[in-house]
Amino acid sequence: MLTKNEIFETVEMIKDQNLDVRTLTLSLSLFDCISDDKKKCADKVYHKIVKTAGKLVETGNILAAEYGVPIVNKRVAVTPVSLIGAASGGFIEIARALDKAAKEIGIDFIGGYSALIEKGITPAEDAFLHSVAEAISSTEKVCSSVNVASTRAGINMDAVVRAGAMIKQLAESTKKQNGIACAKFVVFCNAVPDNPFMAGAFTGTGEADAALNVGVSGPGVVEKTVRNLPHADFAALAEAIKRTAFKITRAGSLIGAEAAKRLGVQFGIVDLSLAPTPKLGDSVAHILEAMGLERVGTHGTTAALALLNDAVKKGGVMASPAVGGLSGAFIPVSEDAGFINAVRAGAITIDKLEAMTSVCSVGLDMLAVPGDTSAATISAIIADECAIGMVNHKTTAVRIIPVPGKTVGDEAEFGGLLGTAPVMAAHSAKSDAFIQRGGRIPAPLHSYRN
């Protein structure tokens, strides 16, 4: 039973500390939409999404009113389109069907314009990769991802090279909007099949036909917890964060299970990820500073983030048997007021962010670099991040924006939750000869566990 104090505490979390359900994401299999006819396949995709997810937004709004918890985003994630469109080759037609369906049902984004190419690229996947720039730049709500590495397969460097070139294409295709199409494209190592957060959400091949996944976020709540313990040792601090994460996860699990019931689908997972926004009081960087760092990025930052990420995961696992997705702390530069200020002050560099990604939930996220950064340099950044994920058995990712016409010190405004990205310096020494070797970087020895 909840005590009166705990009820008041939860109300305060919602009212003053930005606690919210960041997303209700309906995970939807499209395998029954496969056809060798482009139009038939696209039509099946459109109709299945509209039929199954048609009440997602309405259900989310009703639950938000009933429980008094803001539900910020409603989204859909589908089976990787590289698989669904392989028989027909109608990838662009499917992208348009996804966008049309998303607009019809009123959701924020739809994810799954994706390919899993960590070990090789089939002819169909090659055609899919060629379609990504057009598909993403010509639609409003479609998000894309590629998984180019895993602990078991190693790093597909041919795919990494392709990803770097694709990012440059996406930036150029939306150069009048600061390359914003890049914000809808993620390159993964060890991508998870039940991630509810965009832009990397897709429905894995082992998932149910339809399932409701929920993403809960509360950086402001955790920051308040840390600030209330200015003299606690690290064990006590970790315990307090675990308890807070427990409460947040329970709220998300309750709402997610009820949403699934009302939609008539399976309840999937709760992803407790501290996903920041540019709003005041909604910053992961400020949590780390509340631990005693004068500014995020200084020495001790990686250790502080490791403590935070671990405590959040442990608290979430205690609260629900269905914790999944990514769960932990995100560090998207443009979406976090604390990180934005740290970059402006010179306290955060790409190298420091890379070190932090070894202990956070995902990786280099919403990172802006000069528009003239080469595709080879972007591919090298992706390769480094994949190496961290591959060796450490964790998910890592890169969402990077070479902002056309911008250079170091400039800023790119994306608006809304995407925020403002200060343009950061990449290393000037070239990696071209390394990247051009191609092939596959082998999996580490400890990946062989059978």
Image (tube, helix red, strand yellow):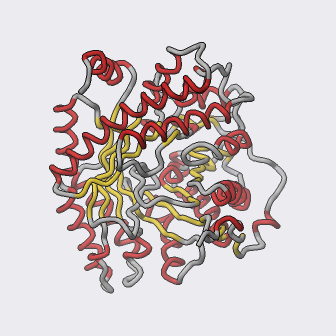
Viewer-nearest residue: 370 or 333: 333
Q: Quadrant of the C terminus?
A: bottom right
Say if 6 sits above or below 47 in the image: above
Query: What is the quadrant of residue 166 in the picture?
Result: bottom right
Residue at the spot 66% in from the left edge and 57% down from the top edge: 382
Q: Position of residue 201 (x, y in %)?
A: 42, 56
Q: Is residue 47 left or right of residue 147?
A: left
- The residue depicted at 26 percent of the width and 60 percent of the height is 101
Q: Is residue 12 above or below residue 120?
A: above
| Residue sitting nearer the eye, 179 or 418 | 418
291 vs 201: above or below: above
Of residues 384 and 252, the one nearer the viewer is 252
Classify residue 298 as left or right of residue 168: right
* Horizontal and vertical percent position of residue 242: 47, 32
Q: Is residue 426 above or below residue 152?
A: above
- x then y, percent, for residue 275: 47, 38
Residue visible at 18% across and 55% down in the picture = 54
- Visible in this render: residue 286? no
**Residue displayed at 21% across by 58% down:** 265
Task: Kindly indicate the quadrant of the structure image that contains residue 6.
Answer: top left
Q: Determine whether, in the image, residue 340 is placed left or right of residue 380.
A: left
Q: Residue furthest right?
A: 429
Which quadrant of the figure contains the N terminus? Answer: top left
* Position in image of residue 234 (x %, y %): 61, 25
Residue 80, visible in the rendered structure: yes
Number of numbered discs: 0
